[in-house]
Image (spheres, grey):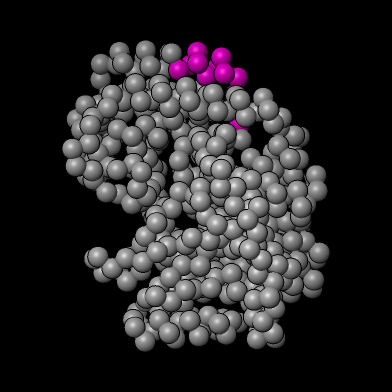
């Protein structure tokens, strides 16, 4: 059965340039509120929503990231359930899906800045290497700002300004804020905390207001939770009409370091969370048999060059299979899954995650409809990685995304 599915999946791969959206940045509109790594392109999500669901349906995104699918469900009349292990991602998603009057934001911004600047004493947070990443002036300014924001009573406004604060942390730190991993930038020009915060808050306010002026929110239910789906998700089996999601493309060490991207912001927000240690493939538990012949063929090729890396890859796919098993149970018969993956290279071998995913879903009663191949042109991802974990050993990361579309038939 697996061999037949492999042949079918190869025939059903379709290169579709209309899914590239190369002239529309993924960070356009409300999605420009706070950068986030490897963000879903909202036009891809919108198109899949409209094609594979109808108004009132329940849409699940178990790797929801910064809430692109949630926003699209809100303005297109779909109910949404989302999970992610990163608390910062959920905070960004809440802000992007919460329209607030611009005047209300601006009035509070003036008060926050005035109150923060005139604070005489402040509590400095205690987390590792704070003085390595921030100047003394930035530490004092951020501490004053944080205290004022946390005193806000209105949760909508508090969350809005927390997100602006998070991006301010990145901008005024000594890191290269255009990188996902924590890298100290030499001779980075110091910027004033309050000026940066004001600039970001004004921009975010405008993005939020203009988006919801154009795209009116529908009367739907949105549900977010910070949760590792490998521990199970509190959804009734057979209740979901459509899954649109993009799981991690591989382990965080050699692909996208979501945890490193978020660490300084989470430290300043007082949230202790090591995202990378909870991501797929991080738990080196016993490996089970995985129903994908192509996976073992590829792992065998890699093991000839590096047996340790081959085992790490199998740990990742072991977790991916477990997550697919959980997701599959939640989809109703006749429901669809749009599984967006990237095929990374390790030791010069391309890991065909799209075909491996087809094998995994087929094991749980799904039929492969087609796989759409789109060129990644507007997604914030590193152009190179170090798949060998050896200094200087670089390889190209994903240039294409594969939108694997399946339907539950059993």
Residue 201 in the image: x percent, y percent?
45, 24
**Residue 233 shows up from this direction:** no
Front-most of residues 72 and 375: 375
Q: Which residues are magenta?
A: 98-109
The quarter in which the C terminus is drawn is bottom right
Front-most of residues 263 and 173: 173
- Residue in the picture at 34% in, 21% down: 195
Residue 124 in the image: x percent, y percent?
26, 31
In the image, residue 224 lies in the stretch drawn in magenta: no
Count the marks: how many? 0
Is 172 located above or below residue 21 in the figure?
Answer: above
Residue 103 in the image: x percent, y percent?
56, 14
**Image-quadrant location for residue 165:** top left
**Image-quadrant location for residue 274:** bottom left
387 horizontally vs 329: left or right? left
Is 278 located above or below residue 315 in the figure?
Answer: above
Front-most of residues 397 and 267: 397
Is 409 located above or below residue 296 in the figure?
Answer: above
Is 397 located above or below residue 72 in the figure?
Answer: below
143 horizontally vs 91: left or right? left
61 horizontally vs 85: left or right? right
């Amino acid at each position: 059965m697996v061999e037949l599915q492999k042949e079918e999946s190869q025939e059903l791969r379709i290169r579709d340039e209309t899914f590239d959206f190369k002239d529309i940045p993924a960070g356009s509109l409300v999605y420009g509120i706070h950068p986030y790594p490897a963000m879903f392109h909202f036009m891809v999500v919108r198109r899949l929503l409209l094609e594979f669901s109808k108004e009132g349906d329940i849409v699940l995104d178990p790797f929801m990231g910064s809430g692109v699918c949630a926003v699209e469900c809100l303005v297109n009349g779909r109910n949404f359930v989302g999970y992610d292990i990163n608390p910062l991602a959920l905070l960004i998603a809440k802000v992007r899906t919460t329209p607030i009057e611009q005047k209300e934001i601006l009035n509070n911004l003036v008060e926050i800045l005035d109150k923060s600047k005139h604070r005489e004493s402040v509590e400095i947070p205690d987390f590792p290497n704070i003085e390595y990443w921030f100047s003394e002036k930035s530490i004092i300014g951020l501490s004053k700002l944080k205290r004022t924001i946390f005193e806000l009573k209105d949760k909508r406004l508090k969350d809005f300004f927390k997100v602006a604060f998070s991006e301010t942390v990145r901008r005024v730190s000594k890191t290269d804020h255009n990188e996902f991993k924590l890298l100290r930038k030499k001779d980075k020009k110091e910027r004033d905390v309050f000026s940066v915060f004001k600039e970001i808050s004004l921009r975010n306010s405008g993005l939020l207001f203009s988006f919801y002026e154009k795209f009116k929110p529908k009367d739907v239910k949105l549900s977010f939770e910070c949760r590792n789906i490998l521990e199970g998700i509190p959804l009734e089996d057979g209740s979901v009409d459509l899954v649109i999601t993009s799981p991690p493309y591989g382990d965080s060490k050699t692909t996208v370091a979501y945890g490193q991207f978020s660490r300084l912001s989470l430290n300043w927000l007082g949230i202790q969370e090591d995202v990378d240690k909870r991501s797929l493939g991080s738990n080196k538990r016993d490996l089970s048999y995985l129903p994908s012949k192509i996976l073992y063929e590829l792992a065998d090729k890699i093991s000839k060059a590096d047996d340790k890396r081959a085992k790490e890859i199998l740990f990742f796919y072991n977790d991916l299979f477990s997550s697919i098993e959980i997701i599959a149970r939640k989809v109703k018969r006749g429901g669809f899954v749009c599984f967006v993956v990237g095929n990374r290279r390790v030791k010069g071998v391309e890991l065909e995650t799209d075909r491996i995913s087809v094998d995994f879903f087929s094991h749980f009663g799904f039929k492969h409809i087609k796989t759409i191949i789109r060129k990644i042109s507007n997604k914030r991802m590193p152009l190179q990685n170090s798949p060998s974990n050896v200094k200087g050993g670089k390889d190209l990361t994903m240039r294409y995304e594969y939108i694997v579309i399946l339907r539950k038939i059993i």
